[in-house]
Structures are given as structure tokens and as C-alpha cells.
Image: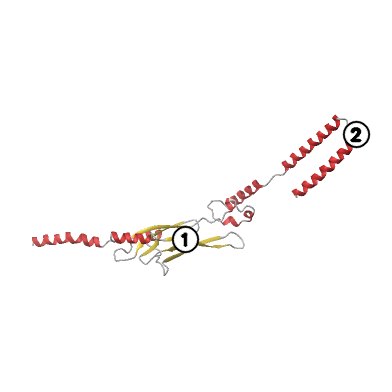
């Protein structure tokens, strides 16, 4: 009996490890599945809703390609919560997932889907990240400054509508050209010009009548130049 007992123990020690080892996805199969999953590519598209009043909204749709029958994918949160959708590739080896929000990064994992022991083996992880949508970009203020940073369609910032309006108005005001200093500078130059003429007349004792005629001519020239300048400004 003792000999039989030892024989049984020997059999267990020899064969049980091999049985346990067989119930795991082999290194070769795991490597093959990882290589398959590494070919996964992603892209996204979006649908924008712009109401007659108020601000718009967007929803994203992700297309995940090269999901062949040997693998399937899940969102990480669904996987760890033990609930959620398991996605298998369609006839084009694609998975299409709609209803994704803007400004989020979605974490996915890929699993083996072949053989008795490789099914469910984690072989790959990847992300689908959607850009942040600026709903304020349709504000009428942005028509004046479409290149301003807060008027871009895809940008991430945390501003209330009041703060957004304040920033855009401030930027618009900073672009306004102040023309008053230019006009004042020109008037000062014209004043200095007439002073020089009067000094010239006094210095060389030009007759009063001639001085009046000269000043009148200069006045006509000045008025014509002023009218021409006013037309350009308008």
C-alpha cells in the first residue's frame, strides 16, 4: 500500500504541473495575438448640432480598425466593472462606437479570442482621445475676431460665458486704431509751418498786401489738403 501511495504521489508531481501549464495561453500564441492587436488603428468623426438660438454641441463616433476575429475589445472601465459591451470586429474588421463626448480620453483593452486557453487573455491597450469643443465659437463677437484664441472651434479652456465675453471684448478693443494723436501731430506741424512763413515775411520786410495774398494762398492750399485728408479718412 505504501508503494502504491508513493507511485500516486509521483504521478501527481509529474503530470499536474503540465496540466496547469496547459491551461494558460502559450508564449507563442500570446506573442501572435499581441502582434495582431498592435495593428489596431483608430480615427474619429463628429456630428455637430447648431440650434437657431443658444450654443451648439457635438457627439463623436470612433472607428477602430483591424479588429479581426482572433481578438475582441472592451472599454477599460467596463472591463474592470465586469459589465459593459464586448466589441467584435464586423465584416470589415471594424468596430464603430458612437456617442463619445468631447474632450475625453477613452481607454480600451484588447483580448485574445482564439483557442480554449487564449480567449480572454489581455494582449493590447490603446486610447481614443476626442478634442475639446468650444461652444462659444459661434458667438457674434467672434465674427469680428475669428482668429482670436477663444474663438477657435477646438480649444480647451474653462471660462463662463460672462468671462468669455469680457475677454473677447477686451481683445477687440485692443485692436482699435486711435487716429486722434496722428491728427494732432499733423496740426502741430502745420502750425509750425505757418510760424516759419510769418518769420520769413517779418525778416525780409515783405509788404503787407503781398503778405496777405501769400497767406491767403497758403490758406487755400491748407484747406485743399485738409479736404483731401478728410476724404481718405472717411
Q: Position of residue 198 (x, y in %)?
A: 84, 33
In this view, 188 is above or below 128: above
Residue highlighted by disc 2: 208
| Residue displayed at 17% across by 60% down | 14
Report the quarter where the N terminus lies: bottom left
- In this rendering, position of residue 134 left or right of residue 108: right
**Which numbered disc covers residue 43?**
1
- Along the viewing direction, whichever of 201 and 137 lies nearer the viewer: 201
The part of the image, by quadrant, that contains residue 127 is bottom left
**Which numbered disc covers residue 22?**
none
In this view, 114 is above or below 130: below
Q: Position of residue 30 (x, y in %)?
A: 31, 60
How far apart in space, not on screen, are marks 1 and 2 (Cα)? 88 Å
| Residue displayed at 86% across by 41% down | 217
The part of the image, by quadrant, that contains residue 224 is top right
SS at badge 1: strand
Task: Tell us which disc is closer to us: 1 or 2.
Answer: 2
Amino acid at each position: 500500500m505504501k508503494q502504491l501511495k508513493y507511485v500516486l504521489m509521483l504521478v501527481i508531481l509529474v503530470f499536474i504541473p503540465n496540466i496547469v501549464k496547459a491551461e494558460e495561453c502559450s508564449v507563442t500564441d500570446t506573442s501572435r495575438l499581441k502582434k495582431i492587436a498592435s495593428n489596431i488603428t483608430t480615427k474619429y468623426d463628429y456630428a455637430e448640432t447648431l440650434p437657431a438660438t443658444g450654443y451648439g454641441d457635438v457627439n463623436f463616433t470612433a472607428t477602430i480598425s483591424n479588429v479581426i476575429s482572433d481578438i475582441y475589445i472592451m472599454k477599460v472601465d467596463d472591463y474592470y466593472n465586469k459589465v459593459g459591451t464586448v466589441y467584435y470586429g464586423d465584416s470589415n474588421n471594424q468596430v464603430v462606437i458612437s456617442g463619445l463626448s468631447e474632450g475625453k480620453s477613452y481607454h480600451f483593452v484588447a483580448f485574445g479570442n482564439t483557442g480554449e486557453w487564449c480567449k480572454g487573455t489581455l494582449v493590447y491597450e490603446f486610447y481614443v482621445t476626442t478634442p475639446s469643443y468650444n461652444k462659444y465659437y459661434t458667438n457674434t463677437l467672434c465674427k469680428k475676431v475669428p482668429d482670436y484664441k477663444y474663438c477657435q472651434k477646438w480649444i480647451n479652456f474653462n471660462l463662463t460665458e460672462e468671462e468669455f465675453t469680457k475677454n473677447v471684448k477686451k481683445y477687440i478693443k485692443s485692436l482699435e486704431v486711435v487716429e486722434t494723436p496722428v491728427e494732432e501731430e499733423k496740426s502741430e506741424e502745420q502750425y509750425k509751418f505757418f510760424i516759419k512763413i510769418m518769420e520769413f515775411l517779418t525778416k525780409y520786410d515783405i509788404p503787407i498786401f503781398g503778405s496777405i495774398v501769400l497767406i491767403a494762398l497758403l490758406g487755400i492750399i491748407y484747406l485743399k489738403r485738409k479736404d483731401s485728408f478728410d476724404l481718405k479718412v472717411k
